[in-house]
């Protein structure tokens, strides 16, 4: 037993020597922190990249917040994404850190050319998080956009993510969702679109006038090339059909009335039932939710049940027609961004095996019906507008 006790201290000493600290550790204070990336194509074989870096000393809260820009940008060109990034590093005094980068901005020219290269570069980099926002910039240059400031945020990259969330859309997941849709056989990928806006007032100060806004969605084909756009007023309904939307504001025109009724719909749900009729596929889309009257610009007394029924019927008719028109507009592109392929695969797995290779063509020819079940449950504290006299109100 004595030899064993003698060896224990020696083994402990050897273990202590083998468990040394991180000899190559890089402190965060010694690195340049990237908050946003931007890529575009300036020629057929020349890429440009721009990175937005935070300036920690300029970041603060309240009175401690600096009035100067809390970020700076660096750009570089190259034959590919990595080459452009390598040339950007030559302008930095520190190694960069991508862990806090939450936004990737894609220029319109690069989106039309195709995202295969950038998806490959992002997918190979172990430091890139899939939970980040990737957006298409409609018009303008990514370098100019990443130079913009935003009055409510120190970093414009944070403003982009927050605008995405405030609009009721799911931010921080668009890169992951794009990969999943691009690799699937059932659906086509889409990305949110942002654009720069011009100031309409000369008196607006540069600091208090936001110069960016969400525009809508960019639709991509299976080759990850930009196939078309869907503006935000139509994009909301696409998100509803897809089952990704929580609430929406709908303006309902009432026959025989000069005004309209504004309905806020919440608790939105979507149900897609797929079937096959001969060589064509058919989809029945049921959109449901609960509505609140937010504005009544008509002479209708909405405390009367028949008037509520009138508004609800018009709501169903107009929304159903509008959604059907949106789907018909996207179908010629052969890009299923509504989840129809996923529904057919889930409900008819054996038939799907014969359809999946030609799904873009089948989607373009699919017959779609819309059914609405949106119940108006709240009308507010008054029935008719206060300004109307009793003789002017329609009971």
Image (tube, grey):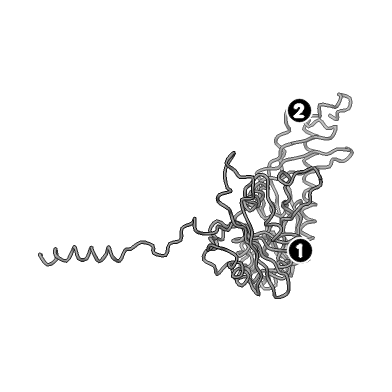
Q: Nearer the viewer, residue 250 or 148?
A: 148
First of labels 1, 2 by sequence position: 1
Q: Secondary structure at mark 2?
A: loop
- Residue 340, image quadrant: bottom right
Residue occupying the point 84% across, 40% down: 254
- Residue 51, image quadrant: bottom right
Count of numbered labels shown in the rendering: 2
* Front position among marks 1 and 2: 1
Q: Position of residue 82 (x, y in %)?
A: 60, 71
The C terminus lies in which quarter of the figure?
Answer: top right
User: How much space separates mark 1 and mark 2, taking CA atoms?
Assistant: 44 Å
Where residue 382 is drawn, which disc sits there?
2
The N terminus lies in which quarter of the figure?
Answer: bottom left
Q: Find the residue positioned furthest to the left.
A: 2
Residue 227 visible here: yes
Q: Secondary structure at mark 1?
A: strand
Q: Are marks 1 and 2 in contact (CB under 8 Å)?
A: no
Q: Position of residue 36 (x, y in %)?
A: 62, 58
Q: Nearer the viewer, residue 122 or 96?
A: 96
Q: Position of residue 185 (x, y in %)?
A: 64, 68
Q: Is residue 362 left or right of residue 31?
A: right
Tell me the crowding category of disc 2: few under 14, some 14 to 19, or many 20 or more residues within 10 angstroms, Cα based: few
Tell me the crowding category of disc 1: few under 14, some 14 to 19, or many 20 or more residues within 10 angstroms, Cα based: some
Q: Which residue is mark 1?
A: 228
Residue 222 visible here: no
Q: Is residue 72 left or right of residue 371?
A: left
Where residue 27 is drawn, which disc sits there?
none
């Amino acid at each position: 037993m004595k030899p064993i006790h003698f060896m224990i201290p020696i083994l402990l000493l050897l273990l202590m020597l083998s468990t040394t600290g991180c000899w190559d550790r890089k402190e965060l204070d010694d690195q340049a922190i990237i908050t946003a990336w931007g890529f575009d194509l300036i020629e057929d074989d020349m890429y440009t990249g721009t990175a937005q870096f935070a300036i920690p000393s300029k970041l603060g809260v309240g009175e401690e917040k600096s009035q100067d820009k809390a970020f700076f940008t660096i750009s570089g060109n190259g034959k590919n994404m990595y080459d452009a990034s390598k040339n950007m590093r030559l302008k930095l005094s520190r190694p960069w850190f991508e862990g806090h980068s939450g936004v990737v901005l894609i220029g319109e020219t690069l989106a039309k050319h195709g995202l295969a290269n950038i998806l490959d570069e992002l997918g190979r980099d172990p430091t890139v998080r899939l939970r980040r926002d990737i957006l298409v910039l409609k018009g303008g240059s990514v370098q100019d956009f990443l130079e913009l400031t935003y009055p409510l945020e120190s970093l414009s990259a944070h403003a982009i993510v927050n605008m995405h969330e405030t609009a009721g859309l799911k931010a921080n997941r668009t890169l992951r969702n794009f990969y999943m849709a691009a690799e699937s056989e059932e659906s086509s990928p889409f990305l949110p679109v942002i654009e720069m806006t011009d100031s309409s007032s000369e008196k607006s100060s540069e600091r208090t006038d936001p110069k960016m806004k969400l525009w809508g969605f960019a639709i991509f084909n299976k080759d990850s090339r930009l196939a078309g756009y869907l503006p935000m007023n139509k994009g909301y309904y696409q998100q509803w059909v897809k089952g990704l939307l929580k609430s929406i504001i709908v303006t309902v025109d009432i026959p025989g009335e000069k005004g309209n009724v504004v309905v806020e719909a919440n608790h939105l749900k979507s149900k897609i039932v797929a079937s096959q009729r001969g060589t064509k596929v058919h989809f029945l889309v049921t959109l449901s939710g609960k509505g609140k009257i937010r504005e009544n610009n008509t002479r209708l007394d909405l405390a009367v049940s028949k008037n509520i029924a009138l508004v609800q019927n018009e709501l169903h008719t107009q929304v159903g027609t509008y959604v059907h028109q949106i789907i018909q507009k996207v179908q010629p592109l052969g890009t299923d961004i509504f989840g129809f392929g996923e529904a057919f695969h889930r409900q008819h797995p054996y038939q799907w095996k014969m359809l999946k290779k030609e799904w873009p063509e089948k989607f373009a020819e699919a017959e779609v019906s819309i059914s609405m079940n949106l119940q108006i449950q709240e009308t507010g504290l008054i029935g008719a507008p206060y300004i109307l006299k009793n003789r002017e109100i329609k009971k």
